Image (tube, rainbow, N blue to C red):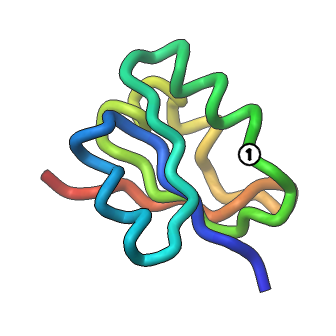
């Protein structure tokens, strides 16, 4: 079974750690891209803040067999 990760601003994602989510704090677009690239292969679901999703772009987060499923948090 894979793991779940979250990428985004500290205020938006840190609480998810209480549910066992691997939290990657990223406060700007470059940090988001670094966090995405550093995800281990065991991650099967990534929760993104809206800002993180915008930084990555739809091409990066679109469903594909070689990357994790992504969801975007609503505000």
Q: Nearer the viewer, residue 59 or 46?
A: 46
60 lies left or right of 30: right
Q: Where is residue 74 in the image (x, y as percent from the top left)?
A: 20, 57
Q: In this view, does 67 lie above or below 17?
A: above
70 lies left or right of 37: left
Q: Is mark 1 on a helix, strand or loop?
A: loop
Q: Nearer the viewer, residue 60 or 43?
A: 43
Task: Name the outermost residue toward the bottom.
Answer: 1
Q: Residues within 10 Å of mark 1 (few under 14, many from 20)?
A: some
Q: How many labels does the image show?
A: 1
Q: Where is residue 19 in the image (x, y as percent from the top left)?
A: 42, 77
Q: Which residue is drawn at 45% across and 24% down?
A: 55
Q: In this view, does 74 lie above or below 21?
A: above
Residue position for label 1: 39
Q: In which quarter of the image is residue 72?
A: bottom left
Q: Is residue 30 above or below residue 7?
A: above
32 lies left or right of 42: left
Q: Residue at x 65, y 36 (%)?
A: 36
Q: Is residue 69 above or below residue 55?
A: below
Instruction: Classify the position of the N terminus by image quarter.
Output: bottom right
Q: Residue at x 41, y 34 (%)?
A: 52
18 lies left or right of 4: left
Q: Position of residue 6 (x, y in %)?
A: 49, 53
Task: Name the outermost residue toward the front.
Answer: 18
Q: Which residue is drawn at 51% across and 74% down?
A: 20
Q: Position of residue 56 (x, y in %)?
A: 53, 29
């Amino acid at each position: 079974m894979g793991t779940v990760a979250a990428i985004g601003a500290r205020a938006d994602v840190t609480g998810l750690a209480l549910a066992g989510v691997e939290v990657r704090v990223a406060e700007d677009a470059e940090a988001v891209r670094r966090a995405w690239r550093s995800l281990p292969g065991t991650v099967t679901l990534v929760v993104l803040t809206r800002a993180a999703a915008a930084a990555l772009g739809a091409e990066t987060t679109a469903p594909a067999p070689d990357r994790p499923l992504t969801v975007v948090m609503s505000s």
